[in-house]
Image (spheres, rainbow, N blue to C red):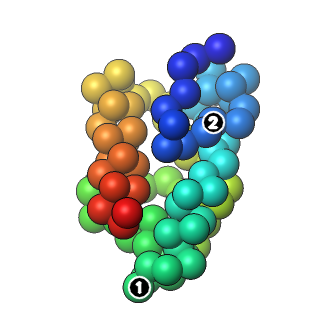
Amino acid sequence: MPEQDPLLRALNYQEVTLGLMFFLAENLYQISQKAKKGRYFLYRDLKDRGISGIKPGLTRQFKLSTFGLAREELEMVLSAFREIIESYQ
């Protein structure tokens, strides 16, 4: 089982091999309750960083495709999530 980042929790590892990951991120949902942009903050913040793929308005549970991404690109995506979470704390 892959090591998990404490900020995000991947729920379905089997899907990782197919390039689709399902996340449960209670902390992002809590941020959305207070954020100026509401539930859409995550979609907009990721879009500003050049990352697309999640549906607008989803913060608690969402899927993200990682199919075809190189390790460096995956690290960029994870780094973007960290930066977003830290910027709202």
Nearest the camera: 80 or 71? Answer: 80
Say whether residue 54 is visible. yes
Nearest the camera: 8 or 56? Answer: 8
Q: In the displayed image of the protein, which residue is found farthest to the top?
A: 1
Nearest the camera: 51 or 7? Answer: 7
Could you say which disc has been placed on residue 55 in the image?
none
Mark 1 element type:
loop
Residue 54 x %, y %: 53, 57
Q: Compared to 5, does 86 lie above or below?
A: below
Distance, label 2 to label 1, CA atoms, is 26 Å
Residue 26 x %, y %: 63, 56
Residue 43 x %, y %: 45, 66
* Picture quadrant of residue 74: top left
Residue at (56, 78) in percent of width and height: 33
Categorize mark 2 by other alpha carbons within 10 Å: few (<14), some (14-19), many (20+). some
Say whether residue 46 is visible. no
Of the image marks 2 and 1, the number of the one nearer the N terminus:
2
For this view, does 58 lie left or right of residue 81? right
Disc 1 residue type (three-letter): Lys
Indicate the quadrant containing the C terminus: top left, top right, bottom left or bottom right.
bottom left
Q: Compared to 30, does 83 lie above or below?
A: above
**What residue did someone put label 1 on?**
36
**What residue did someone put label 2 on?**
10
* Picture quadrant of residue 12: top right
Categorize mark 1 by other alpha carbons within 10 Å: few (<14), some (14-19), many (20+). few
